[in-house]
Structure formats: C-alpha cells, structure tokens
Image: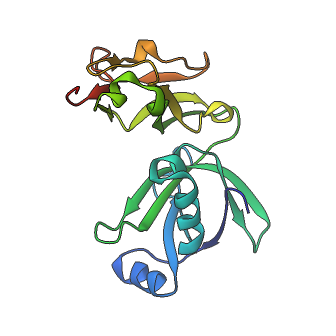
Amino acid sequence: RGDVLDVFAREGAGKTVCRHLKRRGMVPGVFFRPGDESGELLSFASSDIERLVRKHGHVGVGARVLELNFPKSGRKEPVVAKQLMLDPSTNLVENVNFMPCAPNTKVKVNVPVRTEGEDASPGVKRGGFPWKVSKHLEVRCLGKDIPPEITIDVSSLDVGDKVFLRDLRLPEMVQVRVKDENIPILKIAGKAR
C-alpha cells in the first residue's frame, strides 16, 4: 500500500466525537491548507497510521510525503504529517495534523537521526555508546528533497568524540536548523575500558 492513507470526511470535533471514532478503530485528523485555520476534518483507520509508524517510526512518518486518498471522491493529496499526537499510556497515534506538500513546496520537517558503524567504532569497542543529543533535526527543503533520515557514521569515533552539524554530509538543497551550532548532535559517551 505504500505511504497512502485512505481518509474520510468527518462531522464534528471534540472529545465525544473522538471517543466514538476510537471505538470504531478510527483516528481523527485535520488537513490544514495555507491560510485555513479550521482545516478539513478527517478520519482514517488506526491500523493504517500504525502501519506507517511501524515502518518509519513516529518522527519518520513526519519526514515523508504521504498521500491522502479520498475513496469517495477519488481525490488524492500529497501531504506531510506535521504533528502526530500520541496517547501517553499506549503510545498509539491519537490525532494527526496534515499539511499539503507538493514536490516543489518548501517545507520544514523533523527528520530522524540514525547511527551506523557501531561495530567498527573504537569507542564502542572500548565500552562507550553513541549518544544522540538530538534524536531528530529540523530540516528545511522542498517536498521532493526531504531526506528519510540523517545517518551519522560512528565507525571512526572514540569515547569522547563528538559530531557537530558542520561534520554532517547533507545534500546541498537540504538546510538543517539547530539552536546552537556548538552543541553536538551526537557523541560517544561512557567510560573507556
């Protein structure tokens, strides 16, 4: 099925409506267009969004262009999941806010940070571990250029080594925003044996 969600128009908002949707295995969502403050009220199967979360992770779902499919009208909309709200006790998706994302639309999304090369890392071999100071980074780019993840190779890092934004190799059309460029994104933490 790819990254497609079958969505249906819904009537009403609030706790009562959301409870009824939840009992039917549905999740409420809102599709916001630029300048539209109320948005288009939607619902979709909980199993569909949870399938995407299993596939990409909570942050990873927001770092992909998804397709909203309106089966009744045949309409299709490319979107990003701008905000996923999770139930704190079950960690299941409770609500999703979508925004349009055509290939040439400028977007700001959070992209997950992933490490590779732990097996070869001298720091990990000596008892350290890669500690992600930032589990995701805010990225600005066109919809077609959203990276699914930012990968950091730690194979040459020792205990105490740090990776900063300036050390990352990113595509030139992708800009990453951090509050302070002197704060590392990742470091090899722990005590060396």
Asked if residue 42 is positioned above or below residue 60 in the image, the reply reads below
Q: In which quarter of the image is the C terminus?
A: top left
Q: Quadrant of residue 31?
A: bottom right
Q: Residue lying farthest front?
A: 193
**What residue do we see at 42% from left, 81% from top?**
17
- In what quadrant of the picture does the N terminus appear? bottom right
Is residue 45 visible in this depiction of the protein?
no
Extreme residue toward the right, this view: 74
Q: In the rendered view, would you say 18 is above or below 170?
A: below
Tell which of 127 and 60 is nearer to you. 127
Residue 151, placed above or below residue 84:
above
Please give left or right for residue 176 compared with residue 190 in the image.
right
Q: Where residue 6 sits in the image (x, y, percent)?
A: 67, 68
- Residue drawn at 34 percent across, 68 percent down: 87
- The relative height of residue 34 versus residue 161 in the rendered view (above or below) is below
Q: Horizontal and vertical percent for residue 167?
A: 44, 13
